[in-house]
């Protein structure tokens, strides 16, 4: 005897509420094996696949490619054999279909989502729910921006949306903010196409509407032989996230040059024995992360997020590490509770996440929940950088290339010039909540831990 079960979109990290269907990997009526991928999905953090919870026939697809589906919503029906059900199956995300279940919105439409309890807004705005009075759905990021800017539900409903089915995108709401309250609504206007023969403007074009001047990007001419390359989905998301971060946070960057000679000598001395014993290579990244974790314990107000005028002080230290993908895009897997790991544990987590990032094998919940991020610009030979904060964090550190340089050293016999291993640390932070004193002391403390590294240390 067979029965049908629903396959639900699984939870993909505490900050991920929805995913976009990229591609069905199995067709209706097709036999699937347990744990075999049936659909490819994408969030604003990572692409992944949803496996079948058990063997059976994919009897019905409940969403289409391009649909946006909420976490926990049904995406497909699976006809399984009753005998097979006796075997262990994934605890989530399936549930047996019950005819007595209360009716709800059809999961076949990615935009048909029941309204969730309203979220209180900040700064005088009204409640911001998942759906407005018109039934239009608002993504978690759009709602968070609305809350931070004090935009009421009524005001949000009035913003023109350029997304699927008229949805308000991040671009729409960010374009709306500069003209808010001025009677100008231009968020839905797309840049006009410009003939290739038209010369570019020397500065961004300005136009006047109702006495209000708005700035538009200058026209970009396309010359003969030029190649037009469409951004891939991940690059578009990175672009939007970076623009949003610069819009939300006033960035300040402090720099410190650190003498890491002892650290370099120690690693050179132990790396072969370490690899032989642990089966892992030890790079500089785990050593940098260890120093950052120690400094965060000294300055816990770096390990925070800002929600309107409320400061959220994080209990755990979750370190994101920016990793370059073969495609040239960037992804930031997270080492959770790094403060509970020793150097060996951090090293193994760094190597595991980096390897799986390069092979596109990261899970969605390994991308979110970071509280501080490190990016190693030195791996590309850069001596320093000015990194953009990974929202909703308030700070990020870039580690530059380690280079041999002549440096002045103080000795009992007087100052001498010696060849030392030197590097720059660049610390970007959100000046709304992190002042120069804290931002500067933090990066100086990280440098102190690196400079004071015990060359006789054992692990």
Image: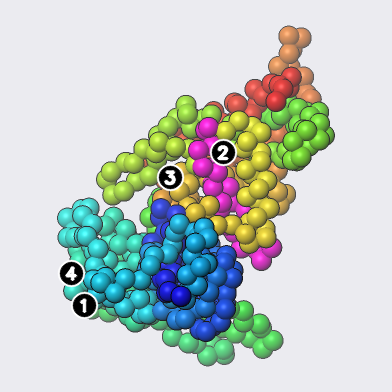
Q: CA distance from mark 4 to mark 1?
A: 10 Å
Q: Which residue is mark 4?
A: 154
> Could you tell me which residue is drawn at 63 percent across and 56 percent down?
357
Q: What SS does tag 3 mark?
A: loop
Q: CA distance from mark 3 to mark 4?
A: 30 Å
Q: Which residue is mark 2?
A: 255
User: Looking at the image, do the residues carrying marks 3 and 2 touch, with CB atoms under 8 Å apart?
Assistant: no
Q: CA distance from mark 3 to mark 2?
A: 17 Å
Labels 3 and 2: the sequence-earlier one: 2
Numbered mark located on residue 394 in the image: 3
Between disc 4 and disc 1, the foreground one is 1
User: Looking at the image, do the residues carrying marks 1 and 2 touch, with CB atoms under 8 Å apart?
Assistant: no
User: Looking at the image, do the residues carrying marks 4 and 2 touch, with CB atoms under 8 Å apart?
Assistant: no
Q: What SS does tag 4 mark?
A: helix
Residue 314 at what x, y percent from top left? 39, 38
Residues in magenta, as a range:
319-340
Q: What SS does tag 2 mark?
A: strand
Labels 1 and 2: the sequence-earlier one: 1
> Could you tell me which residue is drawn at 39 percent across and 65 percent down?
95
Q: CA distance from mark 4 to mark 2?
A: 45 Å
Q: Which residue is mark 1?
A: 134
Q: CA distance from mark 1 to mark 2?
A: 50 Å
Where 134 falls versus 455 (above or below)? below
Where 74 falls versus 339 (above or below)? below
Q: CA distance from mark 1 to mark 3?
A: 35 Å
Report if residue 404 is visible in the image: no
Labels 4 and 2: the sequence-earlier one: 4
> Could you tell me which residue is drawn at 67 percent across and 60 percent down?
359
Q: How many numbered circles are shown?
A: 4
């Amino acid at each position: 005897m067979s029965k049908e079960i629903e396959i639900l979109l699984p939870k993909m990290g505490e900050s991920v509420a929805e995913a976009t269907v990229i591609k069905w990997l199995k067709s209706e009526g097709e036999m699937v094996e347990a744990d075999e991928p049936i659909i490819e999905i994408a969030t604003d953090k990572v692409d992944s696949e949803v496996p079948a919870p058990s063997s059976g026939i994919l009897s019905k697809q409940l969403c289409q490619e391009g649909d946006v589906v909420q976490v926990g919503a049904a995406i497909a029906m699976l006809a399984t054999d009753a005998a097979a059900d006796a075997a262990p199956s994934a605890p989530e995300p399936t549930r047996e279909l019950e005819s007595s279940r209360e009716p709800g919105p059809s999961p076949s439409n990615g935009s048909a989502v029941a309204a969730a309890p309203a979220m209180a807004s900040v700064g005088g705005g009204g409640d911001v729910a998942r759906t407005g009075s018109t039934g239009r759905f608002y993504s978690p990021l759009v709602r968070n921006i609305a809350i931070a800017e004090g935009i009421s539900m009524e005001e949000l409903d009035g913003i023109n949306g350029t997304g699927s089915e008229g949805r308000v995108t991040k671009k729409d709401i960010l374009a709306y903010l500069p003209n808010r309250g001025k009677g100008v609504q231009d968020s839905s206007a797309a840049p006009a196409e410009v003939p290739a023969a038209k010369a570019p403007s020397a500065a961004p074009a300005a136009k006047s509407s109702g006495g209000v001047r708005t700035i538009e990007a200058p026209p970009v001419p396309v010359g003969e032989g030029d190649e037009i390359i469409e951004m891939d989905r991940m690059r578009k998301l990175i672009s939007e996230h970076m623009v949003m971060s610069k819009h939300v946070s006033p960035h300040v960057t402090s720099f410190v040059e650190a003498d890491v000679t002892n650290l370099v000598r120690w690693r050179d001395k132990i790396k072969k024995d370490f690899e032989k014993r642990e089966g892992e290579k030890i790079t500089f990244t785990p050593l940098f992360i260890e120093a950052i974790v120690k400094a965060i314990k000294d300055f816990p107000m770096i390990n925070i997020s800002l929600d309107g005028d409320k400061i959220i002080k994080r209990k755990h230290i979750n370190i994101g590490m920016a990793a370059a993908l073969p495609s040239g895009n960037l992804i930031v897997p997270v080492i959770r509770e790094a403060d509970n790991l020793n150097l060996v544990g951090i090293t193994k987590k760094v190597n595991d996440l980096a390897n799986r990032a390069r092979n596109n094998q990261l899970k969605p919940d390994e991308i979110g929940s970071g509280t501080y991020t490190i990016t190693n610009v030195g791996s590309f030979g850069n001596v320093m950088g000015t990194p953009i904060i990974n929202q909703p964090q308030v700070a990020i550190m870039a580690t530059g290339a380690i280079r041999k340089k002549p440096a002045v050293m103080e000795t009992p016999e007087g100052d001498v010039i010696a060849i030392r291993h030197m590097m720059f640390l660049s610390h970007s932070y959100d000046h709304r909540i992190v002042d120069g004193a804290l931002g500067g002391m933090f990066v100086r403390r990280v440098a102190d831990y690196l400079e004071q590294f015990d060359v006789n240390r054992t692990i």
